[in-house]
Image (cartoon, rainbow, N blue to C red):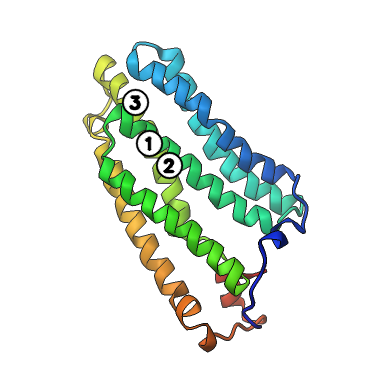
Amino acid sequence: MQIEEKKAKDLFQDRIFTLSNFLSVFRVLLLPFFFQSTYAYAHDPANLSAFSASIFYALAAVISDYLDGLFARLLHQETTLGRYLDPVCDKLVTLGGLFVVTIHFDFPSWILIVYFIREILGVWLGGYLYLKRGLQGRPNWWGKFGVGIVAVSVIWYMSLPYFLKFGAPYSFLLHPVISAYVLLFVLSAGVVAYILRYWNIVFHPEAIELDPENKKQAKKYQKI
């Protein structure tokens, strides 16, 4: 199997308007509503309707992230665009969520910066692999786990004013920074895993030979 260059227009050769692609875009469209409700709650922790709305939007984004992949497989709607759109939308939503809790609920800003740099590099590397190598890398478990940790951290930080005002059932819930450092660890592990996977493909493509019959490689790389 040769590693070949692709063009951006090739992304749109498959179907564009699929249910899975709609769900990917849908969670990005939730961001303005999430920003609005979280702003209202941050300025009035007693506003439980705004708090509930923020939790709802956060959970809806997480559930849609799961459902878009599920429907793509069940309805046979897996496309090149969808495989690229899904992680890009994930990055926008997770960055939006972390930005909100950094502004309103004291999430460590330096961890947000690390996350932002990591996601920008991920988009760049994904585009490079597609356009220059004709490959679409499959996400590793660290990346998937990271999205879940972001959701937990966002909800945990948003819940802190509620816990401070009405009490927390467990004392550790008053320390959401735990989730921030767990996220940092997951991010670091994910970066190491991606570097180990793609180093030779990016810097030594002449030495790479992908075997279409090799199931182990097929789990790591998607030939475009």
Name the residue: 35% across, 11% down. 46
**Residue 100 drawn at (x, y percent):** 38, 31
In 3D space, how far apart are the residues under numbered discs 3 and 2 (Cα atoms)?
Answer: 18 Å
Quadrant of the rendered image containing residue 187:
bottom left
Residue labelled with disc 1: 99
Residue labelled with disc 2: 95
Would residue 98 be found to the left or right of residue 1 on screen? left
Q: Nearer the viewer, residue 144 or 96?
A: 96
The residue tagged with tag 1: helix, strand or loop? helix
Q: Which amino acid type is marked by label 1?
A: Phe
Alpha-carbon neighbours of circle 2 within 10 Å: few (<14), some, or many (≥20)?
Answer: some
Name the residue: 27% across, 40% down. 109
Q: Nearer the viewer, residue 200 or 152?
A: 200
Q: Nearer the viewer, mark 3 or mark 1?
A: 1
Dot label at residue 159? 3
Q: Nearer the viewer, mark 3 or mark 2?
A: 2
Determine contact: label 2, label 1, CB under 8 Å.
yes
Location of residue 206 with respect to 26 vertically, above or below: below
> In what quadrant of the picture does the C terminus appear?
bottom right
**Residue 216 drawn at (x, y percent):** 56, 76
Location of residue 57 with respect to 75 vertically, above or below: above
In 3D space, how far apart are the residues under numbered discs 2 and 1 (Cα atoms)?
Answer: 6 Å
The answer to whether residue 56 is visible is no
